[in-house]
Image: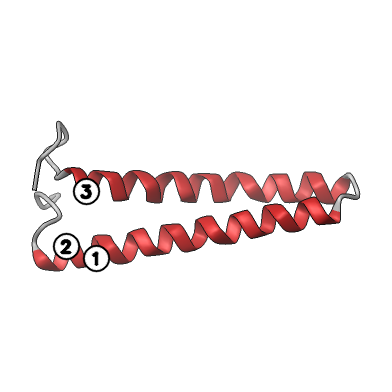
Amino acid sequence: MATGETGFDDVTYDLISVQYHALKAGHDYGQYVRDAENAGKGEIADFFRQVMAEDSERAKRCHEFLRELSVSGDAGPAVT
């Protein structure tokens, strides 16, 4: 696998990046749900909940792929 500037292969870096952004966005969406609810916009709040669930699933899938790469030894150098 190609190794990026971080010392980790590009696929591992990409998965970590997607996982981070999905988790970060999920944190922010909680506020969006509250804002929509406070504005009496239940349908929009439901939309934000759906987006939050999708990002949660996306982060989970990244975690599973990273675990597989770790077990196979393709995840780059071990962090000590």
Q: How many marks?
A: 3
Q: CA distance from mark 1 to mark 2?
A: 5 Å
Looking at marks 2 and 3 on the same chain, the residue that comes earlier in the sequence is marked by 3
Say which residue label 1 marks. 67
Q: Is residue 79 above or below residue 60?
A: above
Which residue extends farthest right? 40
Q: CA distance from mark 3 to mark 1?
A: 13 Å
Say which residue label 2 marks. 70
Q: Is residue 4 above or below residue 35?
A: above
Q: Position of residue 50 (x, y in %)?
A: 65, 59
Residue at the spot 24% in from the left edge and 44% down from the top edge: 13
- Where disc 2 sits, the SS reads helix
Residue at the spot 89% in from the left edge and 44% down from the top edge: 39
Q: Is residue 35 above or below residue 68?
A: above
Image-based side of 2 in relation to 20, left or right? left
Residue at the spot 30% in from the left edge and 50% down from the top edge: 15
Mark 3 burial class by Cα count in 10 Å: few <14, some 14-19, many 20+: some
The three-letter code of the residue at mark 1 reads: Arg
Image-based side of 49 in relation to 68, left or right? right
- Where disc 1 sits, the SS reads helix
Mark 2 burial class by Cα count in 10 Å: few <14, some 14-19, many 20+: some
Image-based side of 24 in relation to 6, left or right? right
Q: Is residue 40 above or below residue 61?
A: above
Pointer 1 with pointer 2, Cβ within 8 A: yes
The three-letter code of the residue at mark 2 reads: Ser
Front residue of 74 and 28 = 74
Say which residue label 3 marks. 11
Residue at the spot 11% in from the left edge and 57% down from the top edge: 74
